[in-house]
Image (spheres, coloured by chain):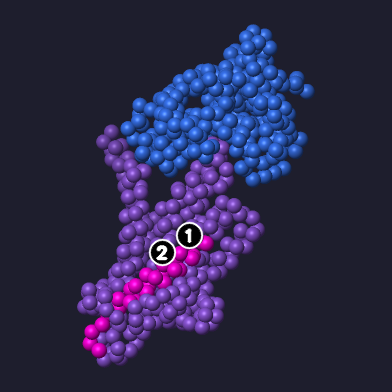
Amino acid sequence: MRPPFPGTPDSSEKSANLTVELETQGVSVYYGSHLAVKQVSLKIPKNHITAFIGPSGCGKSTLLRCFNRMNDLIPGARVEGSVIFHGKNIYDPDVDPAEVRRRVGLVFQKPNPFPKSIYDNIAFGPRVNGYQGDLDELVERTLRQAVLWDEVKDKLKMSGLSLSGGQQQRLCIARTLAIQPEVILMDEPCASLDPISTLRIEELLKELGRRYTIIIVTHNMQQAARVSDFTAFFNTEIDDEGLRYGRMVEFNRTEKIFNSPAHRETEEYVSGRFG
Amino acid sequence: MATQVAAQANLFRRKARSKRVVLDWVMTGLTFASSIFAIVVLASILYYVFVNGIERFNWQTLTQLPPPPGDQVGGFGNAVLGTVIVVSIAISISFPIGLFAAIYLSEFGQNSSTASALRFVIKVLTGVPSIIAGVFAYGVLVLSTKTFSALAGGVALSVLTLPIIILSCEEALRLVPADTRAAAYALGASRVQTVFRVVLPAALPVILTGVTLAIARAAGETAPLIFTALFSFLWPDGLLKPIASLAVLIYNFAIVPFENQQKIAWGGALALVILALITTVSFRLLLSRRQETITI
């Protein structure tokens, strides 16, 4: 038997000023009858960047989508266990998933701006959520936050799709910031970008990490090491019937995961001696 | 060294008589010939209509009423107006219903058994001969109101265009990527907000193309109008009276033995073609202007 997987980062130094933003309690996800992620319990610290790393099929993206109930949109997907946010299980029947998603934003793997103008891309979220303030000001502020303002300020009426891939992804980040979320989920946000765009997004992430709780899924271990404060390592396991599922192996401060992991499989993965 | 290079160059040389190369030529030739054939057929129809119709396509024919037999003047002004009226009635019935049905099929029903059953019925409806749509409107409207009317003609054409509009709108909505929908949901939009503020605007250009096709189809139909809208030698006079239309005018005048009438029929045919052209071009312009402000 394996030792129980820790759900809380190292309780020693600095942990006194960590507050928990999101907590999963025994979360399992099924697609139909197929188990995708098994029994994950972890606590996501507030106003820090948490990275989910692991090989393909380990369920890190699936788990990410539990935090804002995006799995609801996949036919046949079922979530067991609880995701606690503000003391409330967001999977309780009386919870409105749209309200959860307004507080927990998601940036997708592939940049997916709406086929609307740059301005309307940003304004869409605030509009559907009944934003009462000055939209022009909000659009400018979020574009500045996403370090895109200088590049697009003269062409706000042009289509979001006319931007380059890296700009589109920053537009998508700005669009998420515009709904003023408390948590931002990012599903491999740099997977389809070139190295220079990736660098810019990473700088932006570090900046945002001071004020937002960010969870980022990444295939890129260097990226996790560069940007994150905490890292959860996921791995695949094969059950008695030969079916593959994902589980969390280890969760700790990023430097611990990369320098002195508690599990051998973590060490093998982060040092590239995997499989 | 030189021979080596030469040998390498030889390696990549096209082998003129190989089976693959011959097949390549044959297939390219076949596809090219087929497309040329299709264009020639279309172009000769247009040419024939133009050459025969241009003589009676002028301000006089566009503004005058059809002549009685034996008269040497007259036109088809009431038929142009009648076609516009009847087609407008048809589209204003079938477009809203068709669009909402398509939204149900693509966004709400999706793969439910109700949606699959509906989709099957609609596909069957597209294959229904147009005269059946006319018989239906005759039974429902002409018999109950005891008069042939523009309204009955419009309803007959709406029955005919409804399945076309539903299927083309559903196709247009399905072309909107799932990622775009997911992005709207992830920003806290409800299903209705996602459909009406994101999916529908994104699909609009393709939807309008489908509507253009439906309009062109409706304007050219004769059979459903013969015993619904009937025909009139007078200007349109209310929706509950018989009304003239270009298609029925062509049908009526092409088969009579009077040369003047036959020429007017040709003029009407040209008017119909031009009407379809104007519709298509104006929708295109509308779309490209919209794209200019948004895309470039």
Q: Residue at x 72, y 27 (%)?
A: A25
Instruction: State the blue chain.
Output: A
Cα separation, mark 2 vs mark 1, equals: 9 Å
Determine whether, in the image, residue A5 is placed left or right of residue A119.
right
x and y, in percent, of residue A186 in the image: 54, 29
Whether residue A82 is situated above or below residue B72 in the rendered picture: above
Membership of B73 in magenta stretch: yes
Residue located beneath label 1 in the image: B168
Q: Decide: marks 2, 1 in contact (CB < 8 A)?
A: yes
Which badge, 2 or 1, comes first in the chain's sequence?
Answer: 1
x and y, in percent, of residue B125 in the image: 54, 69
Instruction: State the purple chain.
Output: B
Q: Which residues are magenta?
A: B71-98
Does residue A264 appear in the picture of this structure? no
Q: Nearer the viewer, residue B270 or B38?
A: B270
x and y, in percent, of residue A97 in the image: 63, 38
Q: Chain of mark 2?
A: B
Residue located beneath label 2 in the image: B213
Where the C terminus of chain B falls, by quadrant? top left
Which amino acid lies under the numbered mark 2 shown in the image of this protein? Leu
Residue closest to the far top: A13
